[in-house]
Image: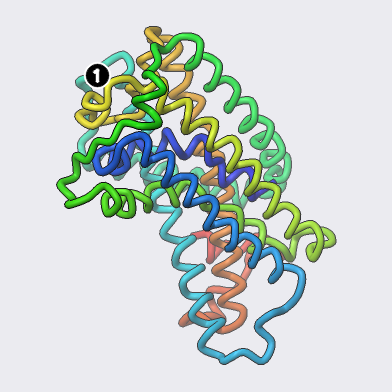
């Protein structure tokens, strides 16, 4: 459930386009789709390896530096993802406002205060609200699936559509690279970001029942489910987003997709749905990052590990790691 809800590939696709138009600026829609296909096919090997590692301890007898280096990369990666996720949530507020007030913009200090506020709220959910966290996870999972349908139907019904030839065959290279292949490789970082998160359950496996069976299952099936929904959302976005130049020139490219419905109310609703899903994913992200940090500190991987690994609000609430 944690893997499914945090990964949310179909909501990351429009949400990630909001923050950076690298994919569209560097490559044509056809190559964005091709990069997505290559990304999920290659990432599937990583998921299969982690699924295998979840069933048995592969690092027994390995060189000490190998698990330590993996611990540092994984822990710091999850910690960094919290910062990016909090920023995306804050930017969603501006995007929702821009539906009715296109010229409105936040100052840097306003962004900073909103990010701090959302971070504090997320920490509260993972500490004093930890008792309701499993219920919140269940509600968020069904909300995640409902949000997929709520977003998909209005886009196909209300948006004017790009021709299939423009989506699947048109080649445009706006990034200044010498060839489209290089541009496609550069933009693949954006696509890979949309496929992250299936391993989140690994870091809370100590709290899962029958972990050797349920963790690999959850990780693999959440990955496949998100690949399917992400592919559907990507194709929907490419057909419904409209003129490519207006997307590249926009401060919030994904908002062009929602406003193409021709209804301010629908665009605002879809923006709010995306905000709720991303914020719910942040709660899971912090839960995963804190447990990852705690587990690595328990194994003496971080400096001041003894202090970091202390849990003061209960055996599963790692307050220091959360803060």
Residue in view at x 45 percent, y 9 percent: 158
230 shown above or below 192: above
Q: Which residue lies furthest to the right in this view?
A: 210
Q: How many labels does the image show?
A: 1
Q: Is residue 133 visible?
A: yes
284 shown above or below 18: below
Within 10 Å of disc 1 (Cα), the crowding (few <14, some 14-19, many 20+) is few
| Secondary structure beneath label 1 | loop
When asked about the image quadrant of residue 250, the answer is top left
User: 26 or 212: nearer the eye?
Assistant: 26
Q: Can residue 313 be seen in this view?
A: no
In the image: residue 135, left or right of residue 265 = right
- Give coordinates of residue 128: x percent, y percent: 62, 49
Residue in view at x 56 percent, y 84 percent: 300
Q: Name the residue under label 1.
A: 102
User: 321 or 195: nearer the eye?
Assistant: 195
User: 39 or 217: nearer the eye?
Assistant: 39
In the image: residue 93, left or right of residue 134 = left
89 shown above or below 304: above
- Give coordinates of residue 310: x percent, y percent: 60, 72
In the image: residue 105, left or right of residue 149 = left
- Give coordinates of residue 264: x percent, y percent: 38, 10
Q: How is the image coloured?
A: rainbow
When asked about the image quadrant of residue 208, the answer is bottom right
Residue in view at x 21 percent, y 26 percent: 245
- Give coordinates of residue 27: x percent, y percent: 29, 41
Residue in view at x 70 percent, y 42 percent: 132
């Amino acid at each position: 459930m944690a893997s499914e809800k945090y990964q949310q590939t179909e909501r990351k696709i429009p949400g990630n386009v909001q923050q950076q138009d690298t994919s569209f600026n560097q490559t044509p829609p056809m190559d964005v789709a091709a990069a997505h296909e290559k990304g999920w096919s290659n990432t599937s090997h990583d998921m299969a390896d982690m699924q295998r590692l979840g069933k048995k301890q592969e690092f027994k007898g390995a060189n000490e530096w190998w698990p330590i280096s993996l611990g540092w990369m994984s822990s710091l990666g999850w910690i960094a993802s919290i910062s990016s996720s909090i920023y995306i949530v804050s930017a969603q507020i501006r995007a929702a406002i821009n539906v009715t007030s296109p010229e409105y913009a936040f100052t840097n200090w306003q962004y900073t205060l909103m990010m701090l506020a959302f971070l504090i709220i997320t920490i509260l959910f993972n500490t004093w609200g930890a008792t309701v966290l499993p219920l919140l996870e269940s509600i968020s999972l069904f909300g995640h699936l409902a949000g997929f349908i709520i977003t998909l139907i209005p886009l196909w019904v209300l948006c004017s559509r790009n021709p299939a030839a423009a989506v699947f065959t048109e080649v445009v290279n706006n990034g200044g690279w010498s060839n489209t292949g290089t541009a496609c490789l550069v933009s693949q970082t954006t696509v890979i970001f949309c496929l992250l998160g299936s391993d989140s359950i690994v870091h809370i496996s100590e709290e899962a029942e029958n972990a050797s069976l349920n963790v690999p299952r959850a990780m693999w099936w959440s990955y496949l489910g998100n690949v399917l929904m992400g592919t559907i959302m990507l194709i929907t976005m490419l057909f419904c987003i409209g003129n490519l130049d207006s997307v590249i020139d926009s401060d919030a490219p994904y908002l062009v997709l929602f406003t193409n419905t021709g209804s301010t109310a629908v665009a605002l609703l879809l923006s709010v749905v995306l905000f709720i899903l991303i914020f719910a994913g942040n709660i899971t992200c912090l839960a995963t990052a804190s447990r990852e940090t705690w587990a690595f500190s328990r194994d003496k991987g971080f400096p001041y590990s003894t202090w970091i690994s202390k849990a003061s609000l209960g055996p599963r609430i790692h307050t220091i790691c959360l803060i």
